[in-house]
Image (cartoon, grey):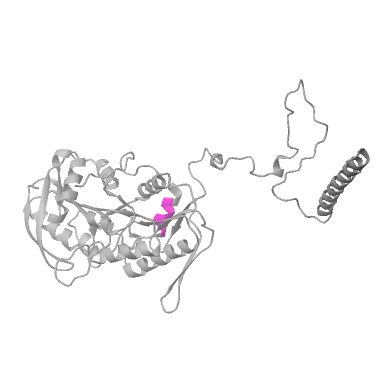
Amino acid sequence: MDALAFSSTCTAFNSASCHRESLATSRRHSRSRFGISPPRSTVSCRLVEPLKSNNGSTPDFKFLNENAFPGALTVPSMVNAGSKYDTRLRIFSGTANLSLAQEIASYLGLQLGKIKIKRFADGEIYVQLQESVRGCDVYLVQPTCPPANENLMELLVMIDACRRASAKNITAVIPYFGYARADRKTQGRESIAAKLVANLITEAGANRVIACDLHSGQSMGYFDIPVDHVYGQPVILDYLASKTICSNDLVVVSPDVGGVARARAFAKKLSDAPLAIVDKRRHGHNVAEVMNLIGDVKGKVAVMVDDMIDTAGTIAKGAELLHQEGAREVYACSTHAVFSPPAIERLSSGLFQEVIVTNTIPVLEQNFPQLTVLSVANLLGETIWRVHDDRSVGYEQPYSSLDID
């Protein structure tokens, strides 16, 4: 190739390059003129004055407006690093125990999530979340207390609504787990309803369950998802410790043989008090007959411990026997106040010095002079936070388990 031809080729190449640059510049001006923003992969900077460099050092770039890129320079994990709580933790409540859910949210420094729950004319339940939960850790507070079937179905529909709203994790917080007493077959052709309810909660879409004082420990094994079993007895222990009762006068009483392990653990925490057992024979559901007493209660303050009080037949007949055996005072302590009729009449008949329960089930409309209601909101709130923060629930917190074996 001669010099003239080579020069012509270079001229053509340079002309094509200039033409491409001109087209690119024209496109940019056209986008700017018609309000079309540049692609996201490009970043344009406008300099007020020429770049200055001292002795070859790297120039110092400064953004003209820090609000031009909101959040672009902020590491997500450092947002509100001083706050204990984050926006991915959401608490929702069903209609079963709204006051407890509000106390839990208050402990966590949060507001209850907005949710719409209503019932149609035929009794069907409708649930709609009023805010986004996409990618959030959702905690649904709903005890399956009376009416048990209504509240259980409401919990299942709430779980399904959260699952379809793309919640990251769904935890069912069940302060009182209904159907827990149907945990085994005592006769032929009986159902094990506790296992059935566990399957329903799991299939609805729950990823975890937080339960308080299950009727029996084996109920945790009915779930195919993690279960955090929280004991409400420490709340009652703290209250009893504040009363002026001499430890030498105390005796802890189990109202039946099945609650011996619970009563023994309670007595160990209560200044290692002695233990007594009421032996009873049950002839039918919600019908109990006291037979005899194992242990000495004469002249002592008897503290009867149970996980729940339903019709109060067991604990009332036990209190009668304790008084017959010479007990000076009788206290009834229970986590779950089911209070099915005629429980109020039996508990307020003068057999008990005080009836101490917690608010896992709302009892505001069933008050009587001897009743004392303690709150487990801080206990459940701390458990929720530790689960959310991937921390141990049982061994580091003051509300540790009672080591029931």
Q: Position of residue 328 (x, y in %)?
A: 13, 48
Is residue 395 visible in the rendered image? The answer is yes
Q: Residue 211's image quarter?
A: bottom left
Q: Where is residue 63 in the image (x, y as percent from the top left)?
A: 73, 37
Is residue 147 visible in the rendered image? The answer is no
Above or below, 211 relative to 194:
above
Total marks placed: 0
Q: Residue 171's image quarter?
A: bottom left
Q: Where is residue 225 in the image (x, y as percent from the top left)?
A: 34, 56
Q: Furthest-top residue in view?
A: 55
Q: Position of residue 330 (x, y in %)?
A: 17, 51
Q: Furthest-right residue in view?
A: 4
In this picture, which residue range is highlighted in magenta?
Answer: 98-104
Instruction: Give whichever of 315, 110 is nearer the camera.
Output: 110
Q: Residue 43's image quarter?
A: top right
Q: Is residue 362 left or right of residue 106?
A: left
Instruction: Give whichever of 47, 353 is nearer the camera.
Output: 47
